[in-house]
Image: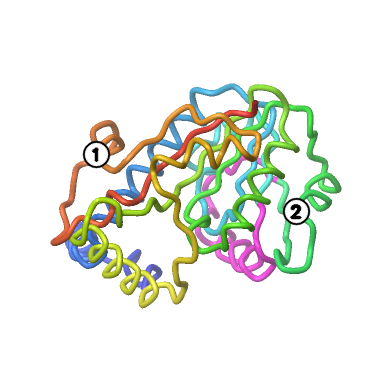
């Protein structure tokens, strides 16, 4: 679906995004604003290393070429995804400069992320920016805790970690809970991946702190859209359950 949409003329692409945003109740708006916020953080925060954890088809090596040439970049993902991205890059980026990066292909169920990153040349004492987008809600809680603890362990003082978290809307009442259920069904239908973890907003700071990370910013949809993106309102607003967390190693 994403590949097909990329071939559409701009007006048709925008119309499709609006419809998709309605189906996912504001989630597309959140994702676009999230990308902008993370780009800004990378551009404004000095670092020796940038780790794209679960890099997928991330395009920042092209979009942030000058900035990422100043850091050692690691792209971490499953071997199948890394292989597919490499194949597509030969065509998509044929005439585009890309910042150098070290590809760390890893089977997350079998391999140690820490071992593979250190083998790839990562410096655990260096200032690092970790980008972990669109992953945590699909993992069990313990896997999220373990990953955040690993990130803290492999980061020098003043390193930043930016990731999104699905908060628990049940405390906001029946309507918010129903909205989350609709969003879950839509996401599972589009991506075949169910949500496995969420964290009540008033517990996010403590959750990150338990892994050695201090929350600097906890940004919701309206916070992000106010800074970075025009609001595309869906029919229900479940996307406010999505939050972008910026934290720092303690």
User: Would residue 107 be found to the left or right of residue 208 on screen?
Assistant: right
User: Would residue 96 be found to the left or right of residue 155 on screen?
Assistant: left
Q: Measured from the top left, where is residue 11 in percent x and y?
A: 17, 58
* Mark closest to the chain's N terminus, 1 or 2: 2
Q: Dot 2, crowdedness within 10 Å: few (<14), some or many (≥20)?
A: many
Measure the C-alpha gap from mark 1 to mark 2: 34 Å
Picture quadrant of residue 105: bottom right
The colour mode here is: rainbow
Q: Measured from the top left, where is residue 66 in percent x and y?
A: 55, 30
- Single out the residue that lies furthest toward the right: 119
**Could you tell me if residue 121 is visible in this image?**
yes
The verdict on residue 151 being magenta is no
Q: Which mark is residue 164?
A: none
Q: Dot 1, crowdedness within 10 Å: few (<14), some or many (≥20)?
A: some
The verdict on residue 83 being magenta is yes
**Vertical relation: 7 (above or below) 234:** below
Q: Give the range drawn in magenta.
A: 76-101
Residue under label 1: 222
Give whichever of 243, 60 is nearer the camera: 243
The residue shown at (67%, 40%) is 73
Give whichever of 13, 44 is nearer the camera: 44
Residue under label 2: 113
């Amino acid at each position: 679906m994403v590949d097909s949409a990329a071939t559409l003329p701009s007006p048709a692409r925008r119309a499709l995004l609006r419809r998709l945003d309605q189906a996912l109740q504001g989630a597309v708006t959140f994702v676009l604003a999230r990308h902008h916020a993370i780009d800004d953080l990378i551009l404004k925060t000095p670092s020796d290393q940038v780790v794209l954890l679960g890099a997928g088809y991330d395009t920042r090596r092209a979009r942030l070429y000058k900035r990422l040439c100043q850091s050692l970049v690691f792209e971490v993902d499953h071997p199948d995804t890394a292989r597919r991205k490499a194949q597509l890059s030969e065509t998509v980026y044929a005439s585009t400069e890309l910042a150098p990066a070290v590809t760390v292909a890893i089977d997350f169920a079998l391999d140690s992320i820490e071992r593979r990153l250190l083998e790839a040349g990562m410096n655990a004492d260096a200032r690092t920016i970790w980008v972990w987008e669109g992953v945590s809600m699909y993992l069990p809680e313990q896997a999220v805790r373990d990953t955040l603890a690993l990130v803290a362990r492999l980061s020098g003082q003043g390193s930043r970690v930016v990731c999104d978290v699905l908060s628990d809307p049940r405390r906001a009442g029946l309507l918010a809970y129903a909205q989350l259920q609709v969003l879950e069904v839509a996401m599972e239908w589009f991506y075949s991946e169910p949500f496995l973890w969420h964290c009540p907003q008033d517990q996010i700071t403590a959750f990150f702190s338990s892994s050695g990370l201090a929350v600097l910013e906890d940004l919701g949809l309206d916070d992000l859209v106010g800074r970075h993106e025009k609001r595309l309102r869906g029919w229900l607003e479940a996307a406010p359950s999505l939050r972008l967390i910026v934290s720092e190693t303690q």
